[in-house]
Amino acid sequence: MDNEQALQQFKTAIYQNNYDDFDVIELGLFLLESGDFQQRWDVAKLFPQVGEKIIEPLLIILENENIETEYRWFVARILSEFNDLKVIIPFTKLLQTTEEEEILNVVAEGLTKMGNSAVKSLEILLQRDEYSRLLAVKALAQIRHSDTIKPLLTVVDDYNPEIRAIALECLGSFHHKPLIFILINALSDPVYSVRKEAIIALGMQSKLATEFNLVTHLKPLLYDINLEICQQTALALGRIKTDEAIEELSIVLQKKNNSHKTKKRSY
């Protein structure tokens, strides 16, 4: 059987709702592997109608980086039609591991497209073990939808600092006033990576700088024990650009210059 015959047989089975026939899955996989671009496109549009039974064999293909990229790209497009944890979690893992731009793009778009329905599935994972929570928060960060705010707030105090940092980074992308207090509280987090995300996020809230006294909260971090925190705080104040922010940066610069002069005299 050539590809055209296989495609016609596949389409006929789909149009006749003959999804229970195992041959339909075999035909679909055969065409995805050996078909040209148009044949693969036709299969990708229809294959999701077969249902969840195609998820497992497609995931095996998607996760095998030895398989042709275009083949896996079509597989990812098909899988993105399923709002199922069996798809969401592998998609999230791929975002962390693959370096193939084509795959990254379609997987990220897939998670975003799932939107609110995916969020509900991920909320379940946030109530499980640490590994599950980490995967869930990474997936929520990719979705970037306002519906992610509520579940992300449940992990801003998680004992895993990586989870806290990812949650804050994502929350910082939303311009919601109630979130400012969460970000301010995180400035005193004992882990520098968490403080860093809070600083970056607050630096993006220049319109709220006066209302929430952001400069007052940020300026102590210009003298943080971690140099990167000092640098990020300076950048954040530079973005805020109020007179108070500029004054604080000037004070730090003056102290630095005086320190250099003192060192030179000592020599």
Image: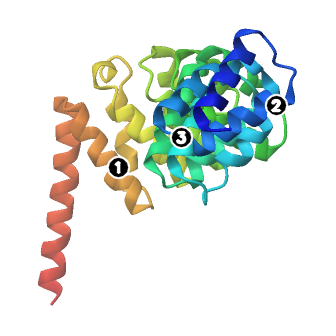
Q: Is residue 24 left or right of residue 256?
A: right
Instruction: Locate the C terminus by quadrant.
Output: bottom left
Query: Which badge, 3 or 1, comes first in the chain's sequence?
Result: 3
Give above or below for 92 relative to 66.
above
Q: What's the amino acid at mark 3?
A: Trp
Residue 227: quarter of image: bottom left
Q: Position of residue 7 (x, y in %)?
A: 62, 27
Q: Kindly identify which residue carries mark 2.
A: 23
Query: Which badge, 3 or 2, comes first in the chain's sequence?
Result: 2
3D distance between C-alphas at marks 3 and 2: 23 Å
Q: Kindly identify which residue carries mark 3.
A: 73
Q: What's the amino acid at mark 1?
A: Gln
Q: Kindly identify which residue carries mark 1.
A: 232
Residue 199: quarter of image: top left
3D distance between C-alphas at marks 1 and 2: 58 Å
Judging depth in this view, the residue of 167 and 131 nearest the camera is 131
Under circle 2, the secondary element is: helix
